[in-house]
Image: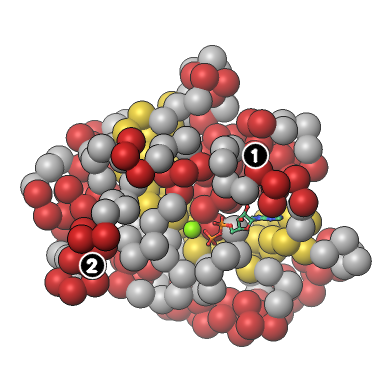
Amino acid sequence: MSQVISIHSFRGGTGKSNTTANLAAMLASEGKRVCVIDTDIQSPGIHVLFGLEGENVTSSLNDFLWSGRAIEDVAIDVTPNAVREKSGQIYLVPSSIKPGEISRVMREGYDARQLTQGLKELLTKLKLDYLLIDTHPGLGQETLLSLVISNTVIIVLRPDQQDYEGTGITVRIAQELRVPNILLMVNKSPSSLNPDALAEQVQEAYGCKVIAVLPHSDEMMELASRGLFSLEQPTHPISEKYRAIASQIG
Ligand SMILES: Nc1ncnc2c1ncn2[C@@H]1O[C@H](COP(=O)(O)OP(=O)(O)O)[C@@H](O)[C@H]1O
Ligand SMILES: [Mg+2]
């Protein structure tokens, strides 16, 4: 059975895109077929982590939503060599970074049913084991749609009062939409906090499982989204965490 996993957060900059891309790398390193879709249509970016510059984004979700292209045809094979050697595959459905196309979405919106249908088609057409959805922060239309079709949502939060409040709202909505598996991932935790105590505290506050607490990492900041951290530094504690999350959801 293929799994649909949404990676979400109430606020931006929590680490959703890095988490999504690294989980994709870790799942595919186990020989799985994975597709990442960027539904952050208003502020796309995950293509950068897979080494695609704007001009290499030759097809996008926008082409499916407006130009009638088949969803599987706008997926780009972004499998890194290290993953291909392990018989895994990663596809990416990027979102357009052309200003005209972004403003068109903002102005005209899109057909929600068509997007839902496209997500389902991706599973069968690309014979996926996992579809990972990198969402726009907050609770917009794309988020609600992606939650409805997800088996699992990973809500990423920082240990920050603003994130705490927003996460509570997001958990409630995911529960109302009956997402079967609601997981929390705490990211960018300062070294002064005890990760086990923090995990317990967050788990109790929301009544949801905390799948991992990731420390703030200067090395991650230095990579600055130029690549997949877990492949570049496979023995780093952060990479171990990504690997552990992948094996828990796998
Ligand atoms: N654990 C971490 N430690 C330090 N920096 C991180 C960590 N996780 C993510 N980042 C950095 O935070 C920034 C935002 O990450 P990103 O994945 O783009 O977040 P989002 O998609 O939620 O907006 C990036 O510069 C990224 O390198
Ligand atoms: Mg992002």
Residue that protrudes farthest toward the left in the picture: 68
Kind of residue at disc 2 = Ser
Confirm or reject: label 1 Cβ below 8 Å from ligand 1.
Answer: no
What residue would you read off at disc 1? 229
What residue would you read off at disc 2? 103
Position in image of residue 54 (x %, y %): 35, 44
Quadrant containing the N terminus in the rendered view: top left
In the image, is residue 83 above or below residue 101? Answer: above
Tell me the quarter of the picture where residue 52 sits.
top left
Of labels 2 and 1, earlier in sequence is: 2
Neighbour tally class for label 1: few under 14, some 14-19, many 20 plus, Cα within 10 Å: many
In the image, is residue 5 above or below residue 143? Answer: above
How far apart marks 2 and 1 lie (CA) works out to: 32 Å
SS at mark 2 in the image: helix
Say if mark 2 contacts mark 1, CB within 8 Å. Answer: no
Position in image of residue 92 (x %, y %): 37, 39
Tell me the quarter of the picture where residue 232 sits.
top right
Instruction: Tell me what residue is drawn at x 45 percent, y 75 percent.
Output: 138
- Side of 58 where 54 appears, left or right: right
Kind of residue at disc 1 = Phe
Instruction: Tell me what residue is drawn at x 69 percent, y 51 percent.
Output: 221
Position in image of residue 14 (x %, y %): 60, 64
In this view of the protein, which residue sits in the foreground, 53 or 50?
Answer: 53
Residue 250 in view here: no
Instruction: Tell me what residue is drawn at x 66 percent, y 36 percent.
Output: 230
In the image, is residue 109 above or below residue 218? Answer: below
Position in image of residue 102 (x %, y %): 26, 62
